[in-house]
Image: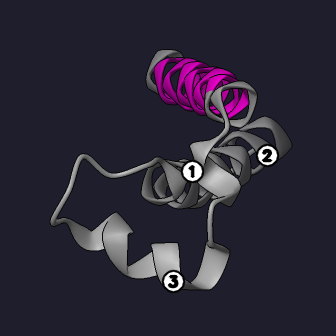
Amino acid sequence: MTILTIILKTISVVCALLLTLLILMHKGKGGGFTDSFDMLTGNAGSSGVAERNLNRWTILTALVWVATILALDLI
């Protein structure tokens, strides 16, 4: 394996794990898995600004993940 392949695979795995955590942090629409975290976080996720920033980080992480997958496919 080349160094570039190892780096891209590492970035891909880190982004996948981070993307999973970011998606789980989103405010639930009711009755889902994310409602179990409301007891722990209180009202921290109810802010509009916090939710928008979380959306931005989720989209950015997803774009980096897709870019690394495409780069790995092209190599």
Looking at the rendered structure, the secondary structure element under dot 3 is helix
For label 3, the residue is 39
Q: Dot 1: few (<14), some (14–19), or many (≥20) neighbours within 10 Å?
A: some
| Towards the viewer: 47 or 14 | 47
Residue 55 in the figure: left or right of residue 66: right
Q: Dot 3: few (<14), some (14–19), or many (≥20) neighbours within 10 Å?
A: few
- Can you tell which mark lies on residue 22? 1
Q: Residue at x 53, y 28 (%)?
A: 62
Percent position of residue 72, x then y: 54, 29
Q: Residue at x 69, y 30 (%)?
A: 57
- Can you tell which mark lies on residue 41? none
| Towards the viewer: 9 or 4 | 9
Q: Main secondary structure of the magenta part?
A: helix
Foreground label between 1 and 3? 3
Percent position of residue 60, x then y: 66, 22
State yes or no: discs 1 and 3 in contact (Cβ < 8 Å): no
Q: Earlier in the sequence, mark 1 or mark 3?
A: 1
Looking at the rendered structure, the secondary structure element under dot 1 is helix
Residues rendered magenta in the picture: 52-72
Percent position of residue 27, x then y: 44, 49
Q: Is residue 69 magenta?
A: yes
